[in-house]
Image (cartoon, helix red, strand yellow):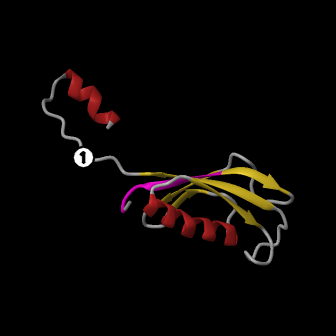
Amino acid sequence: MTNGFVFITVTKTSGSAPRHVGSKMLVRVDGSISGTIGGGALEHQAIKDALEILQSGTAVAKEYPLGPLLGQCCGGSVELFFEPFAQPKKVIVFGAGHIAEELTPLL
């Protein structure tokens, strides 16, 4: 996928972790984000992984140990679920009646 975004959710934590289960972050195709899953090296690696997953278009869960290999000092681990979404195609609405008026903001 060359467009769209990846939605990342913390699905499991073990030991000390920077964020709790249910924390979410959105990664856009340009690498910009909304939300956080904990910052630091974990977040940088997750963004890198999200951009690769966006290309494959396949949802995946990955576990990250939060120790020296990742450059984190928490010592626990987190599991992240990556869910890629393609940007919707263009839609053309013909007409300017009451149906188009209600439909257009939804698109």
**Where does the magenta region start and end?**
2-9
Tell whether 90 sits left or right of 70: left
Q: Residues within 10 Å of mark 1 (few under 14, many from 20)?
A: few
What secondary structure is the stretch in magenta mostly built from?
Answer: strand
Residue depicted at 67% across the width and 50% down the height: 23
* Residue 60: percent from left, percent from top: 58, 55
Is residue 29 magenta-colored? no
Number of numbered discs visible in the structure rendering: 1
- Which residue matches tag 1? 90
Is residue 5 magenta-colored? yes
Amino acid tagged 1: Lys
Tell whether 1 sits left or right of 82: left
Above or below: residue 55 compared with residue 101: below
Tell whether 54 sits left or right of 79: left
* Residue 63: percent from left, percent from top: 71, 61
Residue depicted at 54% across the width and 52% down the height: 59
Above or below: residue 92 compared with residue 50: above
Above or below: residue 66 compared with residue 102: below
